[in-house]
């Protein structure tokens, strides 16, 4: 896990409870007791902020507004006793990703954190234009693949299969999942067709074709251990 989380709350007891529980789940945690202090601790390694709204000095709203104006897209969850509809609308209008009312359960906070981090990871992977694995490069925008800078002549279907697997390394996809993703639900394709396309894809990828491995009875994956 090891994601970096910054907790910002002027109630030290809340910070301590959150810090203890989140560290026990494997997160790297830092705390700040004011928005001003938090701004000095915010780094490129910070992956999520738990932010109180009402604090002495700069409010959580103002802090989030500031970092959004600075171009930061880091996910932020407000933790606050201000739970009216207007308060929530204000939080979302300045760029919050979620809103948890006090008092809260640690389980709820943990579940919200996991959901948001997963969503941001998925979005980042989907938006990434180039996937690089040693000398193999896959440009998801231009739909091209290269080995040592040399173009690999892939059909549209072959490229879509490669992209599907490479975007989710080490995850096994069943043949049916590949069919639904690449061909869609409106086209009749047999699972054997998937095998044929992957055989051709492996040959075109030369040594990198070994990374597309099959787990008998389950499906295919892009195996980073075989690169």
Image (cartoon, rainbow, N blue to C red):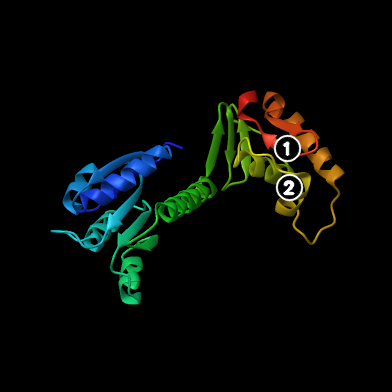
Is residue 4 among the parts visible in the rendering?
Answer: no
Q: Judge whether 85 appears above or below 100 on screen.
A: below
Q: Judge whether 55 appears above or below 155 on screen.
A: below
- In the rendered image, residue 185, in percent from the top left (x then y), is placed at 77, 59
> In this figure, which residue is indicated by the disc labeled 1?
220
Q: CA distance from mark 1 to mark 2?
A: 9 Å
Q: Is residue 126 left or right of residue 203?
A: left
Q: Residue at x 86, y 43 (%)?
A: 192
Q: Residue at x 35, y 44 (%)?
A: 5
> In this figure, which residue is indicated by the disc labeled 2?
178
Check disc 2 and report its element: helix, strand or loop.
helix
Can you name the residue that lies furthest to the left here? 57
Do callouts 1 and 2 mark residues in contact (Cβ within 8 Å)? yes
Quadrant of residue 151 in the image?
A: top right
- In the rendered image, residue 178, in percent from the top left (x then y), is placed at 73, 47
Specify the quadrant that holds the C terminus: top right
Q: Residue at x 35, y 61 (%)?
A: 96
Is residue 58 among the parts visible in the rendering?
Answer: yes
Report the front residue among 92 and 113. Answer: 113
Quadrant of residue 138 in the image?
A: top right
- In the rendered image, residue 124, in percent from the top left (x then y), is placed at 48, 48
Q: Residue at x 37, y 63 (%)?
A: 99
Looking at the rendered structure, the number of numbered marks drawn on it comes to 2
Crowding near the residue tagged with mark 1, few <14, some 14–19, many ≥20 C-alpha atoms within 10 Å: many
Check disc 1 and report its element: helix, strand or loop.
strand
């Amino acid at each position: 896990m090891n994601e970096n989380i910054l907790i910002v709350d002027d109630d030290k007891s809340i910070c301590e409870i959150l810090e203890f529980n989140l560290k026990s789940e494997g997160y790297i945690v830092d705390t700040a007791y004011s928005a001003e202090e938090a701004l000095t601790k915010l780094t490129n390694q910070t992956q999520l902020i738990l932010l109180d709204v009402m604090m002495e000095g700069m409010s959580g709203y103002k802090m989030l507004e500031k970092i959004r104006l600075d171009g930061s897209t880091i996910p932020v969850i407000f933790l606050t006793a201000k739970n009216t509809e207007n308060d929530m609308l204000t939080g979302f209008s300045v760029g919050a990703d979620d809103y948890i009312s006090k008092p809260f359960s640690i389980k709820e906070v943990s579940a919200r954190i996991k959901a948001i981090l997963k969503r941001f990871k998925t979005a980042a992977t989907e938006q990434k234009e180039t996937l690089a694995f040693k000398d193999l490069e896959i440009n998801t925008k231009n739909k091209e693949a290269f080995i040592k800078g040399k173009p690999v002549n892939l059909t549209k279907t072959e490229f879509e299969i490669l992209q599907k697997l490479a975007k989710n390394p080490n995850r096994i996809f069943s043949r049916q999942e590949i069919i639904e993703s690449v061909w869609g639900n409106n086209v009749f394709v047999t699972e054997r067709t998937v095998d044929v396309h992957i055989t051709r894809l492996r040959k075109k990828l030369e040594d990198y074709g070994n990374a597309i491995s099959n787990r008998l009875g389950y499906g295919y994956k892009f195996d980073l251990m075989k690169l």
